[in-house]
Image (cartoon, rainbow, N blue to C red):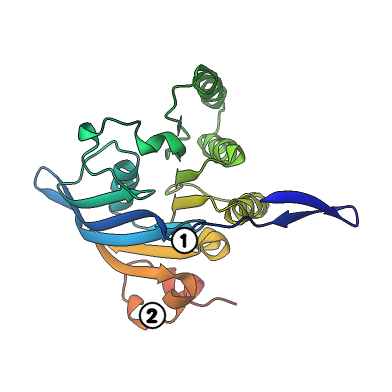
Amino acid sequence: MSLTSSNGNLVLIPRRIPRGPYFALHHVSKAFGSTLVLDDVSFNVNRGNTLCIIDSSGAGKTILHLLMEFLKPDSGQVIAENEDISDFSQKLNQPISRKIVMVFEDGTIFRPSTSDKIKYSSQRIQMSLRQERSRETRRWRAAVEALAENPEAILLDRSKAKTSPCQMHHLEALFRRRKAEGKTSIVLTEESSVIRRIADQVLLLEDGSVRFSGTLSEMTRTRNLIDLPYQWLDQRVLSLP
């Protein structure tokens, strides 16, 4: 993306975005002890798109951790930027996660980097966040800090967050910028307002399995979703204006 002036106004010019998925899971399963968290999960996230994951069982968090290379799948493939990162202990090159920033549920920002400057910046931001009295403020500030850095890919765990209308306007602008620049995002959330305003793709998980994967408009036409235990789903997300 470039910025240019038209009658004194700044205009966003989208850059040419490479085709193909940035992230992909192919038949991934993951268990912790006897608990199966992911059961044969497959989906793609196209470059420049924002995927919203809807989940209440922990499967969404596990997906984020797999993409950050914190975990290995028990079976299946985890792909990031055309690289198989399923068994990252076998790689000799720098991990792909160096291009990915993650914001955890509690507001912690994880930026894998060998740069002392970025490490210092991360530590300084974390100290600032810990000084915040409100947990919700910490979450919001961390999301904005990470989005403002505009990394190639970002993973946001907003599963417990509450977004005000004012924050939603700001959030939407940041994601619009990312889309114009071909940057990829995954957001774990159950907030219908967030999903409606920023999602290009939606992944709906139930008991560790994929119940729906596709675009938001496709989701509105999928009537067999109404029996899910998400009370707001049919009323707010499936009835777009």
Q: What crowding class fits label 1: few (fewer than 14 Cα within 10 Å), some (14-19), or many (20 or more)? A: few
Q: Which residue is identified by label 1?
A: 19
Q: Which mark is residue 222?
A: 2
Mark 1 vs mark 2: which is more N-terminal?
1
Residue 154 placement (x, y as % from top left): 47, 44
Depth check, mark 1 against mark 2: the one in front is 1
Amino acid type for the residue under numbered disc 1: Arg
**Where is residue 231, by image quadrant?**
bottom left
**Where is residue 100, by image quadrant?**
top left
Q: Quadrant of the C terminus?
A: bottom right
**Figure check: 126 above or below 68:** above
Q: Residue at x 75, y 49 (%)?
A: 3
Residue 55 placement (x, y as % from top left): 34, 57
Q: SS of the residue at dot 2? A: loop
**Figure check: 167 above or below 129:** below
Taking the image as shown, residue 229 lies to the left or right of residue 2, namely left
Q: Residue at x 8, y 47 (%)?
A: 34
